[in-house]
Amino acid sequence: MTITTVPHEIRTTDGPYIIQAERLASGLHVYEIPAGIEPADPCRWRIGHHSGRYIASTRDRAAALELAVDIADWADWTLDAETLRALRAGRDEASIAYFLECIRMAGGHLGACSDYGPYGC
């Protein structure tokens, strides 16, 4: 798999940011969130969708790259986010379990650490 560095717009509560991201598959990006975004979040690395939304968080680049490779063929990441959500809803339990296990095995999780309450992840 070829890694290409590209400008990527991410969505935050403060508005959009343009960052440099590594594209592993069309529509699938790996990047570190800027220091000013969720500064207490220990999971600084994200696997993101081309829409600017992110899929999962990890603590380091190696884990994020591993996860991105593992899920690259799970979906057509070039599709819009709404279409991907609809396709995920139609997947069987084994497929969803595989996707979630890939995230867990990489030491990652869905959402930001702050989504897990006052204790983080």
Image (spheres, rainbow, N blue to C red):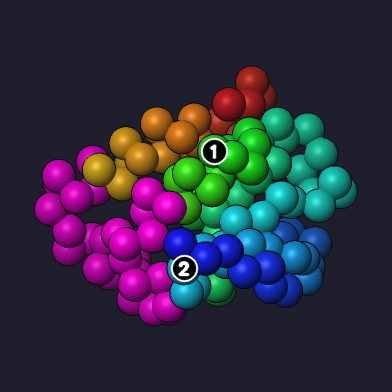
- x and y percent of residue 11 in the render? 68, 65
Secondary structure of residue under mark 1: helix
Q: Magenta segment: does it hold 96?
A: yes
> Which numbered dot is residue 83?
none
The residue identified by callout 2 is 25
The residue located at (81%, 39%) in the rendering is 39
Residue lying at the far top in this picture: please name it: 119
- x and y percent of residue 97 in the render? 23, 41
Q: Say which amino acid is labelled 1.
A: Ala
Secondary structure of residue under mark 2: strand
Q: Is 40 positioned to the left or the right of 9 in the image?
A: right
Q: Residues within 10 Å of mark 2 (few under 14, many from 20)?
A: some
- x and y percent of residue 111 in the render? 53, 45
Q: Earlier in the sequence, mark 2 or mark 1?
A: 2
- x and y percent of residue 59 in the render? 63, 34
Q: Magenta segment: does it hold 99?
A: no
Image-quadrant location for residue 58: top right
Image-quadrant location for residue 54: bottom right
Q: Disc 2 to disc 1, how far (Cα)?
A: 16 Å
> Which numbered dot is residue 63?
1
Q: Say which amino acid is labelled 2.
A: Ala
